[in-house]
Image: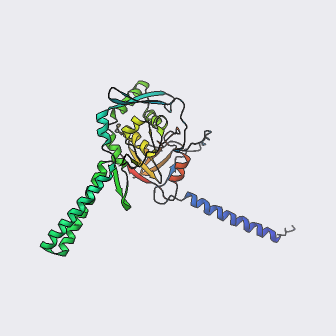
Amino acid sequence: MRGARLHPLYFLALAACLASAWTLGREWEALMAPPAGGGVLLRAQSSGDEEEEEEAAEEQEYTSRARHTEKGTAQRIYKEGGELKAQYHFINFNKDRVSVNFGMKEPAYRKYLAGYGYADFELSGLRAWRETARGATWKKTYAESGKAAAERAIAAVDLEYETRLRALLRARGLALRAGNLVECDMPVIVKRNVEMLKPLALAFSRIAAERRWSEENLIGGVLSMVQTAIRYKIPPTVEDGLHTGGLLPPARTLLSGWGDCDTKTGLLASILGNWKGIRMVGIAVPGHYLMAIRRLPGKGDIFVRYEGLEYVLVEPAGPAWLDPGTVGQATTALLAGKDGYRVEPFF
């Protein structure tokens, strides 16, 4: 048999193909690597040889600029007889049309709002106390016990100042982070508002019982309201001289009819917290906040693992109508980004 001659160009082409394959392999490894600074983002796969169904609907992403409103949703915010009231109409994921109401008397509402945010004069007063205490402590301790003892006493004053500062912020739903950054303490806000939103949770329970909803439909009903009936709008970080942390507390969200991603997450978790069997965590990524619910992920659900358990992601921000296990494209990119995500347990 006559042997085939290999032209030199053949070897050049072969080398180019091998180099291309090596490059693609490196890129694929990079894509599969877990994000730095956070856990691993996972998507549930089908079992056995079952083929995945292709979704025809385009995945929507949350955005503060969106004016989209799901069909069948409406809200009415009004005042009646000294009581602030809100009424919401929306459609659950199972296509049920739902209406719920929430209200608070004005004095109770004013007292409620006083528990959030802080004014500059409060921190100024705390700093003034520290300076006065430092001066008096140094003078007294130095005279009695010398310089070393006075320095230790000053350190104790500084520690007391930080303790008082953190206590003040925590009482207002805020937390002091590294670099003296003040931000919302979502677990504290959620736990504090569970009882406040119990009447609304009971309303959902009655609807669920009447319509024989499963737990999935119950969660979906609350999520649908938060996503679609409450408008997306970013709160100011300072309002009427009050530093808010850029968040509306849950009851105010309901009685205002709007909120952003962390505001809506706080509202959703505070309502769901009334059912003891539901375990939740907050998910913080740069510039965005969402949550996850403890349950076994279904096919295609996006989830994270926390302390060895699966938590299915939930996107409360809206205005997109996304059921549990589905998040927007922008959120997916943030979760898989180099900064990763931070998990904050609620319940």
Q: Residue furthest top?
A: 210
Q: Is residue 158 left or right of residue 257?
A: left
Residue 17's place in the image compared with 53, above or below, is below
Q: Is residue 199 left or right of residue 293?
A: left
Q: Residue furthest right?
A: 2
Frontmost residue, 344 versus 13:
344
Residue 104 in percent (x, y) is at 33, 32
Residue 230 in percent (x, y) is at 46, 36
Q: Is residue 136 left or right of residue 275?
A: left
- Res 17 quadrant in image: bottom right
Residue 116 in percent (x, y) is at 33, 45
Identity of the residue drawn at 54% across and 38% down: 67
Quadrant that contains the C terminus: top left
- The answer to whether any part of residue 294 appears in the image is no
Frontmost residue, 264 versus 223:
264
Residue 58's place in the image compared with 106, above or below, is below
Frontmost residue, 336 versus 90:
90
Frontmost residue, 260 versus 309:
260
Q: Residue furthest left?
A: 144
Residue 101's place in the image compared with 302, above or below, is above
